Amino acid sequence: MDRTPLGIVLNGVTGRMGLRQHLIRSILAIRADGGLPLRDGRVLWPEPVLVGRSEAKLRAIADEHGLTDWTTDLEGALARPDVQVYFDAQVTSARVKALRTAIEAGKHIYTEKPVAESLSEAIDLARTADEAGIKHGVVQDKLYLPGLQKLLRLVRGGFFGRILSVRGEFGYWVFEGDWQAAQRPSWNYRAADGGGITLDMFPHWHYVLEQIFAPVRAVTARSVTHVDRRWDESGEPYAATADDAVYGLFELDGGIVAQINSSWAVRVNRDELVEFQVDGTEGSAVAGLHHCRIQPRAATPKPVWDPDVPTGQRFRDQWQQVPDNEVFVNGFRAQWEQFLRYVAEDAPYTGDLWAGARGVQVAELGLQSSNEGRRLEIPELPR
């Protein structure tokens, strides 16, 4: 079998997401299964080049996974002729500079979101990449979650009739770091380092709403910092200056209204860390990371408001599970495979830097809406 190597610089693999989801569960998982089969019979073989700032961490990761190609010299790695793709999973504040370097080196780029801290930077990146003639993509992992794949199946099948509204709840309590270690890096809670849940999560919600339901036309948001004092990885206290919760209202084509709450200061009282309820004229659904439950119009119960009598209805039991009907692979791997096919054989691909810029646009407008206390329409991006 003809195996075609593809050199990929992976920058940021010493971080949790870059290591677990992108290296181990995507690139190494593809290699463990023998590579990625292409339409012409070849097998694409990813050759990872690990890049980061810490020699010790890179060496430890490489040794653990049987890899030998790693370096702290990003420009040197990008200058190699056997490298065709650059991937970025660094902190947000370091991303734009590295992406520009990769574009100037003529590499195809694939990156975590947000692609930039500002809309002007995101647009400039997309234009520069287009002018360079390279292929580019942005991680949109939430679309590949089993629960949202089932939800998309329902939308495409016309299950909801006319969709009326979407309600989303995301988040969990992130420990402050004083008496129990935090589950997220401290930079997430410092505005100067590119932290903040609005910039982190609004790009996700934008592509979920846009690609499953309809284009987003307006946003109203309230971003807040509920916990203003936290402790970093060294146990030192610091001022948490970035927003740790955002409450958003999105207006979509077709009159659909979406309300999505995102918080790192909420305790979970739901089945999964993120859930979306979609209500339509012909039925409703509740989708999370893995499950999706439905209640069609003909099977909708008839609650009656009576605050003086305890209800005998068990509302959660009145929903039906949507079956898997297929094997869902890891969402990050699924999109990696899609992007690699885009690079290797020009397969269809939509999640490019312009999609990433639209996500930054919604986040930026969300923060502006919060600061000014008003609804903002979302204009088309100037290309």
Image: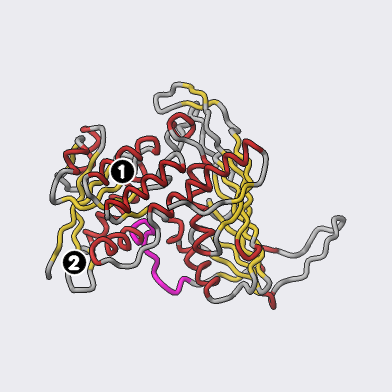
Q: Nearer the viewer, residue 150 or 315?
A: 150
Q: Residue furthest right?
A: 308
Specify the amino acid type for callout 2: Val
Distance Cα–Cα, label 1 vs label 2: 27 Å
Q: Which residue is mark 1?
A: 99
**Mark 2, secondary structure of its residue:** strand
Rendering coords of residue 357 (x, y %): 44, 49
Q: What segment carries the magenta color?
A: 324-334
Rendering coords of residue 49 (x, y %): 20, 46
From the viewer's perspective, tell me whether residue 33 is left or right of residue 201: left
User: Residue, x 30% and y 62% (percent of image)?
Assistant: 337
Q: Is residue 41 above or below residue 166?
A: below
Q: Is residue 330 magenta?
A: yes
Specify the amino acid type for callout 1: Leu
Q: Which residue is mark 2?
A: 43
User: Residue, x 55% and y 64% (percent of image)?
Assistant: 213
**Mark 1, secondary structure of its residue:** helix
